[in-house]
Amino acid sequence: MLNSAKIAAKGLLHASEVLRQLRAFWDGYTTWRYRNPWATSSERLDAPDQSNPLRLFFDAHTEGPGIWKWRHYFDIYDRHLGRFRDRTVRVLEIGIYSGGSLEMWRNYFGPGCKIYGIDIESACKVYESDSVRVFIGDQGDRNFWRQFRQEVQSVDIVIDDGGHLPEQQIVTFEELLPHLRPGGVYICEDIHGTLNPFAAYIYGSAQNLNACDKSQENGDNNERRLVYSASPFQSAVRSIHFYPFVTVIERTEAPISELVSTKHGTQWQPFLK
Ligand SMILES: C[S@@+](CC[C@H](N)C(=O)[O-])C[C@H]1O[C@@H](n2cnc3c(N)ncnc32)[C@H](O)[C@@H]1O
């Protein structure tokens, strides 16, 4: 009897926690979906940044092989990819279409870059050159990626601008994230819709960044140092960034074994132990 009461009480606690989280999700969702706290702002996502080399290249590129990008992507690219410019870098773009974006990446990263383009359409093979290698295949096919990984060593940057179906984006992410070099950047484009399954998959993965196993807690006697063992996800993934239609995942520069909190200073208020 006592046991059943305990189980029922636990069930109630769990249900109320689930309800609390659903409520928080709903509050966040409706706040930003239906209200606009910045209604007076005139700032636009595509407000031109004249110094962005990708936007400059795109705006000047009025003839030749077509490039098709959302304008607000250029600032996102430059923010996360700028540090790779003029370095020896391996860049993989899924979705070649008319070849212009391959030219854009080559111009942006400089002569030290090697570009891998992937497309399901065999006509895209014409975009192969000394600095660009083209693979024809379906990004939703895990066998295709297995073969790709045998031929190409790990890459620094992945830009998924291919079929844009969530199931293709998930397969590609799962197959390529482990193939991304330490410090590498993974960009998935054209994630559309508020209940998009790829976005939901990434939100779920993102929860792992906050994982903390308190049973592994390892503090010293005066509690100036708190250490949690890093999970495999925390060890490999540095950060996840959400933008309109784009998600960026950055890999850690080196595996992380622990997350450490320390206190510096000698004067402390009494209210927090
Ligand atoms: C939006 S276009 C790419 C645009 C190009 N990156 C640019 O910036 O101009 C999408 C490309 O993805 C290719 N694609 C569609 N489904 C694919 C799949 N399952 N695997 C690989 N490529 C695919 C299409 O053939 C098309 O060329």
Image: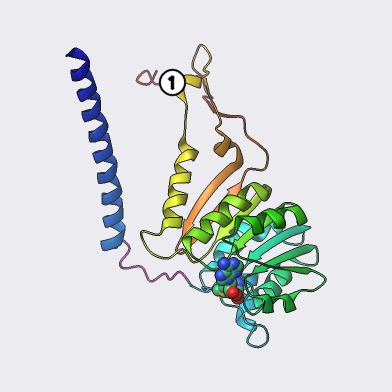
- Residue 125 or 246: which is nearer the viewer? 125
Q: Quadrant of residue 135?
A: bottom right
Give percent across and percent down for residue 183: 66, 47
Which quadrant would the N terminus be assigned to in this image? top left
- Residue 152 or 131: which is nearer the viewer? 152
Instruction: Examine the rendered structure and indicate whether residue 210 appears above or below residue 37.
Output: above
Name the dominant secondary structure of the magenta segment. Answer: loop
Q: Callout 1: helix, strand or loop?
A: loop
- Which span is picked out in magenta? 38-45
- Count neighbours of disc 1 (C-alpha within 10 A) and say few if under 14, some if 14 to 19, many if 20 or more: few
The residue depicted at 64 percent of the width and 83 percent of the height is 60
State whether label 1 is within 8 Å of ligand 1.
no
- In the rendered image, residue 54 lying in the magenta stretch gets the answer no
Residue 50 shows in this picture: no
Which quadrant would the C terminus be assigned to in this image? top left
Q: Furthest-right residue in view?
A: 130
Q: Name the residue under label 1.
A: 268
Would residue 30 appear left or right of 96 to someone viewing this image?
Answer: left
